[in-house]
Amino acid sequence: MSTFNINRFAQALKCQFLVMRKMWIRLFGIFTLVMFMAGLFWTRVQGTGYDYMVENWPAEDVYRNYNHYVEQTLVFSVIFFCFSMLFGASYLFSSMKETRKRSAFLLWPVSNLEKYVVNLLLSILWLAIITVGACLLADTLRVFVDWVTGRIVIWGFPKLAEPFVNNAAFEHWQTAWMFFTWVFYIHSLYIVGGTLFRRQQFLLTSCTIVLVAILLTMLLNQIDWNSMNIEFITGTWDEKTETYTHIFHPFFYFTRMQVINNKWLNV
């Protein structure tokens, strides 16, 4: 069997998608409900009441304050998206917890690389599409409720493009690049944890990252940096290469998965 065959991979991707379609529909509904309820909370529960603002404030102040409430719903959606990506990365092989499902998946007539990429695309890329779609639908429902109840109609989803339209994201591109690099790096660590751990992947991965960070901080605090002559040279460490390494390391763990495994680790 060849290492990677595009036609065979497409069939495997379609099959895995159809097998898990009920879970995707359920997640889409849950995500939409959570973000819709969060939108109602930020616009109707917290802060100054809308009716009070309309009766006592100028129209410009009402619009500015309500626009701020809408921006808070957008911040919640972005945070929710980040956690969704971490959960997706850590539950990369959540469908293989049972021995029956594990044996059925590992016996597929496709290569290990194709099996790994199928799960990678569905658990990360497709989950990202589902989360973005749920965010857009939740924002649409919130706007519909505002329109029915006679409130100001302010869309929140298009505000995501404002930093790019105003060139704010390009003025400090070094900071933005560093931020996104660390985001992808942390995400890749959750991919490793999702492949390595068999149970409680998100919890164990999070605890491991926190524990390593604490131990590393304690170790670095023991070093007398003032007595050391260290020169930092920009560009000596390629963060992109480091991230890609963590993304593809789990493939080697996946190739060592066992059908019958009652341990906490997949290997």
Image (cartoon, rainbow, N blue to C red):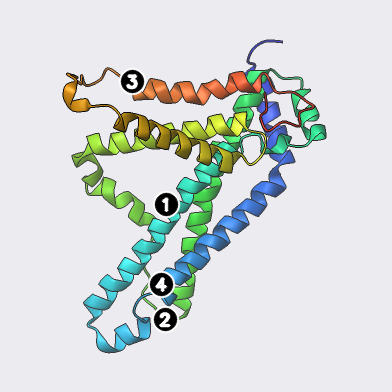
Between marks 1 and 3 in the image, the one whose residue lies nearer the viewer: 3
Residue at (24% x, 84% y) in the render: 57
Labels in figure, total: 4
For mark 1, what is the residue? 78
Do residues under tags 4 and 3 come within 8 Å of each other at their CB atoms? no
Between marks 2 and 3 in the image, the one whose residue lies nearer the viewer: 3
Q: Position of residue 31 (x, y in %)?
A: 56, 56
Circle 1: residue type:
Val
Q: How far is disc 1 from disc 3 in space, using C-alphas? A: 27 Å
Q: How far is disc 1 from disc 4 in space, using C-alphas? A: 17 Å
The mark nearer the N terminus, 2 or 3, is 2
- Quarter holding the N terminus is top right
Residue at (48% x, 56% y) in the render: 136
In the depicted structure, whether residue 188 falls above or below residue 34 = above
In the depicted structure, whether residue 77 falls above or below residue 199 = below
For mark 4, what is the residue? 43
As rendered, which of 7 and 204 lies closer to the eye?
Answer: 204
Residue furthest to the right in view is 100
For mark 2, what is the residue? 150
Circle 2: residue type:
Gly
Question: What is the number of the mark on residue 238?
Answer: 3
Do residues under tags 4 and 2 come within 8 Å of each other at their CB atoms? no
